[in-house]
Image (tube, grey):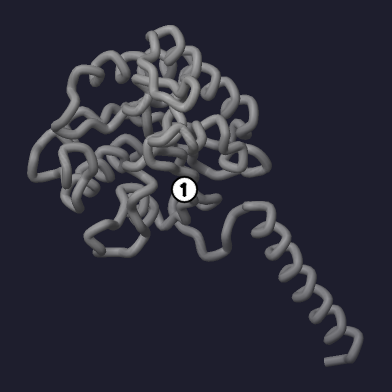
Amino acid sequence: MSRSVKRIGVVVALTIALLAAWQTARGGEQPNASGPFQRGIVVVGDSITAEYNDDKGDEFQGWWSMVGRHFGAHVTTHAQSGSGYLRQGMECTGNRFIDRPEAFRDTAPSLFIVEGGRNDWSSCIEGRHVEAPDEEIAGAVNHYFDVIQKNLPRSTRIVVLGPPWGTLDQLGRHRLTAIVFAAAKAHHIQYVSTMGTLDRRERVLDGIHPNRVGSRALADRVIAALE
């Protein structure tokens, strides 16, 4: 083999490597990814997402981890306990879904999942949680859907989960779920009901947050909808 041919081979190999690195840096398709979500999955959510990990088989493995591993996709979460479309964190010191622009700007995941809504019965006024009317909640949900649809490319599949609900505090369940459902429908976004996934005592830790069995039930519901 001549030196010129060898040099050409080296240049081609370097070019391929640089292109792969550039694509990865831009959040593009990963060489080792598999399945339908090769550009990864992004999840925005509350404590149902935030308080769990990506350790396979662990007691606190998250539902989103189970979904990602099922499809062979990397999952990035942007979640905070006590937050929602309208509400900041538990002590009114956190941020809302809309306050996490890094989740939907300058990124092009294959799948974008929004999990939450349970906390949106209230908004923060002067550091206190004050019950919010339906119109205010709906306005926040619709605004968030407007923003993510504007910022995410058409190639990104957007999925909205109905607010996961455990066995406690059932009064706002149907009201908040109906608001999120209506907003998703108006925006033509796929809506996945979570009704029945966490409403058994053996599936929750404290009446709200899932144990491993509950996380598995929630993951199975999402996987079935995606497939």
Q: Which residue sits at x=36%, y=54%?
A: 65
Q: Is residue 53 left or right of residue 37?
A: left
Q: Which residue sits at x=48%, y=32%?
A: 158
Q: Amino acid at mark 1?
A: Thr
Q: Nearer the viewer, residue 183 or 170?
A: 170
Q: Is residue 13 left or right of residue 218?
A: right
The outermost residue toward the right is 4
Q: Which residue is mark 1?
A: 77
Q: Is residue 161 left or right of residue 96?
A: left
Give the position of the N terminus as an image quadrant: bottom right
Residue 145 in the image: x percent, y percent? 52, 23
Which corner quadrant of the image does residue 118 belong to?
top left
Q: Is residue 9 above or below residue 215?
A: below
Q: Which residue sits at x=21%, y=28%?
A: 195
Q: Nearer the viewer, residue 227 or 183?
A: 183
Residue 21 in the image: x percent, y percent? 70, 65
Q: Nearer the viewer, residue 15 or 222?
A: 222
Residue 39 in the image: x percent, y percent? 55, 50
Q: Nearer the viewer, residue 35 or 67?
A: 67
Q: Is residue 176 above or below residue 209?
A: above
Give the position of the C terminus as an image quadrant: top left
Q: Which residue sits at x=25%, y=41%?
A: 218
Q: Is residue 112 left or right of residue 13?
A: left
Q: Is residue 193 above or below residue 216?
A: above
Which corner quadrant of the image does residue 207 belong to?
top left
Mark 1 residue element:
strand
Q: Is residue 171 above or below residue 135?
A: below
Within-10-Å neighbours for mark 1: few <14, some 14–19, many 20+: some
